[in-house]
Image (tube, rainbow, N blue to C red):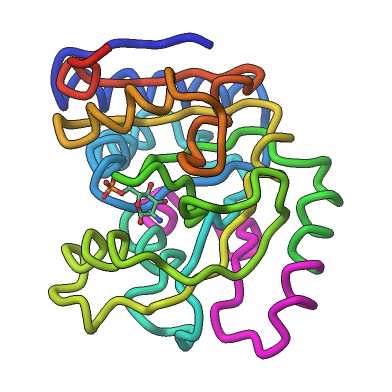
Amino acid sequence: MKIIEVTDTNDFAIKSVEFFEKFVTHNSNSLITLPTGNTPLPFYEKMLGAYKKNNKINKFIYLSLDEYYGLEPDDHRLFANWLDREILTPIGVSPSNRITINSACNDVEKFCQKFEGQIESKGGIDLAIIGIGGNGHIGFNEPGSDLNSPTHKVELTQETITSNAEYWGSEDAVPKSAITIGIGTLKKAKNTLLLVRGANKAEIFKATLSNEISSAVPSTYLQEQNNLTIIADKEAMKLL
Ligand code: GLP
């Protein structure tokens, strides 16, 4: 595990882009998950600048990490659409280089199997870029999730619905269920980059690194993750 401590938001963005650019340059057409949430936004903003200098930065295949369940393809709340607006279209990742979770699928089990098959056919996840929820969720693997599960459907906890209300204005606008890549699949990622930012993540970041590995705090699986890099700011690291 390598922890890169950054001083402020700008430094966070610079170090994240440096890591990403180096990775895609050395591993072209790799399968990469990108997180949503507030944490990665400075990283994506900085990536737009990097793309102007290096237009090969878009040579990767975007893989959905998690997605709300039951929304139509044009819904602005879909994480795939959020990332499309924020980063994928601005840097020119073509739709054919995106493997996304079908929020509107009727047969969830069948869809999840197909999605896992798509990951396998690409040789697995090359780089899982992830954030962390205040309750230790990774993707939408909420506390209590099986740490060996593949992609599956989950019911969101009240804590997650409350925190996600920040993105969409109210809790009513937050879907109550989701489909997420499971921890079992994330564990098999060849490389992982965890992004952590802000004082509100200090407690869960400490628990992630020091609690016993258990589904009570899903992010604890990272303690045994191979090729894990963490980019964290001073605020998030203050309890370590
Ligand atoms: C969201 C997403 C996660 C994200 C996390 C942290 O609910 N499902 O993929 O990493 O919560 O979000 P934020 O960065 O806004 O704290």
Q: In the image, residue 89 lies at what x, y percent?
A: 41, 59
State the quadrant of the C terminus. Answer: top left
Residue at (26% x, 34% y) in the render: 46
Instruction: Kindly indicate the quadrant of the structure image that contains residue 98.
Output: bottom right
Q: In the image, residue 125 lies at what x, y percent?
A: 70, 40
Residue at (61% x, 33% y) in the render: 127
- Image-based side of 101 in relation to 130, left or right: right
So how many labels did they put on this image? 0
Residue at (80% x, 68% y) in the render: 114
Numbered range of the magenta stretch: 87-113
Of residues 57 and 1, the one nearer the viewer is: 1
Asked if residue 103 is among those painted magenta in the image, a careful observer would answer: yes
Instruction: Kindly indicate the quadrant of the structure image that contains residue 13.
Output: top left
**Above or below, comparing residue 11 to residue 40 in the picture:** above
Of residues 143 and 110, the one nearer the viewer is: 143
Residue at (39% x, 78% y) in the render: 176
Asked if residue 114 can be seen in this view, the reply is yes
Asked if residue 29 can be seen in this view, the reply is no
Q: In the image, residue 37 lies at what x, y percent?
A: 30, 52
